[in-house]
Structures are given as C-alpha cells and as structure tokens.
Amino acid sequence: MQRNKAQSIKDLVLQFLRMSGLETPLNEHRLIQAWSKVLGPQMSKYTDVEHLFIKNQKLYVHVTSAALRQELSMARSSLVKTLNDQVGSQVITDIIFN
C-alpha cells in the first residue's frame, strides 16, 4: 500500500491550531513565558511578570525601576526581535513599558 501526501504530525497539529483559532493565543502565551528567559533573572525581577499582557500586537510590561525602564526602552527593537524569534512567529510589533 502506498501513501499519498503524507504529512508530519507537527504540520497537522499546526494546521489544526490555525483552523481552531488557537495558534495566536498559544504563541502569545509562549512569548510571555519567554520574557523572563530573554531578560534573565536579574532584570526580570524588576518587571511584574504576572501582569504582562499582549493587546493589538503590543506587549505591555510594568517595570518597577525607572532606570531599567529607560534601558529597556532603548533596547525595544532588539527585544521585540528576540522575543519573536523565541516563539518562531511574529507575535508582537512593539513593547510598551509603564
């Protein structure tokens, strides 16, 4: 018996997630989980990880240190790229620090 159009399980799962509308929320969750990994333990302790959220492709981050807020604002574009690379998809286009 010969198989036609065999697909990998990974491709089938991704197709199912897209069709179900679950791919975007899953990627957003993965990006938020990657925040602490990307920043590292020293910097992430000054951000309120429990209140990170994404709205309209913007990641909103509450930073408790003004100096760190300024430093992160200057590195915004590289953080966006690094976080999206961690997820493997373009999830966010900007980061808002407050």
Image (spheres, rainbow, N blue to C red):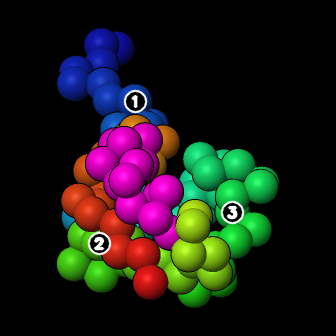
Question: Identity of the amino acid at label 2?
Answer: Lys
Using the image, determine if residue 79 lies above or below residue 62: above
Q: Position of residue 3 (x, y in %)?
A: 30, 19
Tell me the residue at 40%/49% (across/down).
75
Considering only order in the chain, which callout, 2 or 1, is on the residue closer to the N terminus? Answer: 1
Depth check, front residue: 46 or 24:
46
Considering only order in the chain, which callout, 3 or 2, is on the residue closer to the N terminus? Answer: 3
Tell me the residue at 69%/71% (across/down).
46
Q: Which residue is mark 3?
A: 44
Q: Position of residue 23 (x, y in %)?
A: 34, 62
User: Residues under labels 2 and 3: Cα distance?
Assistant: 18 Å
Tell me the residue at 70%/49% (across/down).
40
Question: Identity of the amino acid at label 3?
Answer: Ser
Camera-side mark, 1 or 2? 2
Q: Which residue is mark 1?
A: 8
Disc 3 packing (10 Å; few <14; some 14–19; many ≥20): some
The reply to whether the C-beta atoms of the residues labelled 3 and 1 are less than 8 Å apart is no
